[in-house]
Image: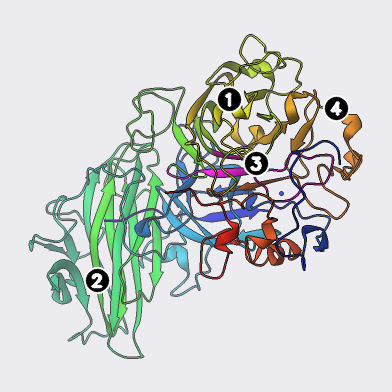
Amino acid sequence: MKKFLILLVALIVTSTIGCKKNDDPNPNPELTMEDLVISPGFDFNNSSEYNVKVTLPSTVDYSSIKKRINFYDGKIEEGGKLLFSGTSNDQGEFIGKIKIPAYLTEIYISSWAGKISYPLNNAAKSTFNIQEDTINPIFGGYDTIPPPDSTSTKKSRFLNNFPLDTWHIKSGNSVTNMITNGQFDDTSFNVIAHWSYNLPDPAIWTMDQYIAPYSGQYNDGGNNTFRNSYQGYSGWNYYLYGGCEQSINVNPGDLITFSADIKSIPYNNNAVVYAYVYLIPFKPNGSPRAYYSYRYDNPTTDWVQKTVTATMPSNTATCRVLIWLNNHYADLFYDNVVVTGPITDSDGDGVDDEEDDYPYDATRAYDVYYPNEDTYGTLAFEDNWPGLGDYDFNDLILDYNFHEVLNADNEVVDIYMKYSVRAVGASYTNGFGFEMNAEPGDIESVTGLSINSDYINFNANDTEAGQENATIILIDDVFHLLPHSGGIGSNTTPGEPYVNPDTLLLTIHFSNPVLSSTLGTPPYNSFIIVDQVRGVEVHLPDHPPTSLADLSLLGTWADNSIPAEGRYYKTVTNLPWVMDNPESFDYPVEKVEIINAYNHFATWAESSGAIYADWYFDDAGYRNDENVYEKPE
């Protein structure tokens, strides 16, 4: 079975100091970094950050439940990796911030109510909007069909055109289907005169008399399905229409979700088919209470899942699960019908146990990873600031993986950072840290620091003292983690001994959880401290210095920072000293500028990231292997 789907999605897209290296000639003197023509607004960021708004079905009461929304870098059924998760508010909306690789052209958004793919325009980074799909009025309009003799009080629209996949967000989970024979392996069907009549047996599929002669179990290539066939129909109506249903016992306030796979095979160009999934709550007296439906116009020949979900209104005793159809010149198929009922919330945080990574801990709900659970990003530094760098971007190569734990209100409760100093192409003894948009007092404790000197002062919770924002000094001496191996630094000069880097774990626990969108996105405001001089900080472009930075260095030598304009850590020709890659980065060898290691870097930079956003890939023609450091065998 497969699942999920989402309604409305809006994505709103917001020198003398140095590494003391030799002055060997550039291996490609025809082009240098200083020759590049870079837009002043370009930040050399290999990721794109988006403000996100996702609106879930209005047929659900969100006052007491919170539903999970997942963002993937690819289709789930094709191995797409989870990029971020969040929770809906009491209006059924998720409002937050995500950060994704800039080379992605679309993302995949999934919830219990369905899923969609969302195209991205990373070059423009402007405002994107997806509205509800347009459904043309037929036979009196969307709200009055089906059934044709009823008036729908509510509707649920979905954008869902995905092939089959799994029902649940978390692999390995099973579901309890509230109806029987959802796979149509049983050939037993009842018949009634009209869909609204009493059912002979609520737990058996019951067809109305209009479609019964043309419907039932059908073996579709070894797979049992429910089929309605127009073949042989000679009724007075242009369409063969009717329904097949079961009834389930429910209570007011129950969240019921009904999902089915649908496809059709037209006989000719005259075929017109309207397929429905429908939830109809019934009062104790046996009359309909409301109608919730989704209509799928002219289903394709491939199976596609459609879903309708609703909170049962007051005075509801049972709910009809109805397949309804209008068929003209086609065979219409339904399969894999699954109906799920009230959520189980063991810890009372509003998140269903099936969607909760911590179902018995009300203070925690979701695990969120950056770049994702299985991969590392890389920060690549030049440490000659405010002097001009040599642009091999290997003075510090630090790999990272952030694991944030969020509560049901999308607040960060814990951070676990795996980090590894992979290369140091410098003579300076540099430190590394990052600043978050939180107060130092929001942090309960920090463990896993690599501190071996006394030039950093700490608060009792091991955040750095004297900082306005919570600042973590992770490393005070990179050579303590990656000792000199010969030549300049470690692991940047071919032929010199290789030092195996260690992977360490930083742990941050919050005493006052901070909203994820407020805290910032990993790797946050990362920076190095040059040669253990605390005031000399080197940050990502357009990221401000911390409270302890020596601001008198801004705008000196090669630096063209203009704080009043929000411009930081760029040269007059707009070159940076730091880059952040959302994937582990194969860095240049010593004294080779990055444009001579990666063939498309210059095009990427001069196009402000619009062309070759994947410039750092190891694809054919992308790089000069002799200029890229390779770990010796």
The answer for how far apart the CA atoms under marks 1 and 2 are is: 66 Å
Q: Amino acid at mark 2?
A: Phe
Q: Secondary structure at mark 2?
A: strand
Which residue is pictured at 79% across the width and 52% down the height? 575
Residue 481 horizontal side relative to residue 373, left or right? right
Q: Which residue is mark 4?
A: 550
Residue 92 horizontal side relative to residue 595, left or right? left
User: Which quadrant of the structure image shows residue 514?
Assistant: top right
Instruction: Say the numbered circle drawn on residue 390.
Output: none
Residue that sits furthest to the top in the current view: 460
Q: Amino acid at mark 1?
A: His
Look at the numbered discs 2 and 3 and tell me whether their residues touch, using CB distance below 8 Å: no
Q: Earlier in the sequence, mark 3 or mark 1?
A: 3
Quadrant assignment for the N terminus: bottom left
| Crowding near the residue tagged with mark 4, few <14, some 14–19, many ≥20 C-alpha atoms within 10 Å | some
Q: Earlier in the sequence, mark 3 or mark 4?
A: 3
Instruction: Say the numbered circle drawn on residue 480.
Output: 1
Q: Which residue is mark 2?
A: 333
Q: Amino acid at mark 3?
A: Gly
Here the colouring is: rainbow
Which residue is pictured at 47% across the width and 32% down the height? 503
Number of disc labels: 4
Q: Secondary structure at mark 3?
A: loop
* In the depicted structure, whether residue 300 falls above or below residue 445: below
Give the percent coordinates (x, y) of residue 353: 34, 33
Look at discs 2 and 4 and give the one toward the viewer: 4
The answer for how far apart the CA atoms under marks 4 and 1 are is: 25 Å
Of 89 and 189, the residue lying toward us: 89
The rendered magenta stretch, by its main secondary structure, is classed as: loop
Instruction: Say the numbered circle drawn on residue 425.
Output: 3
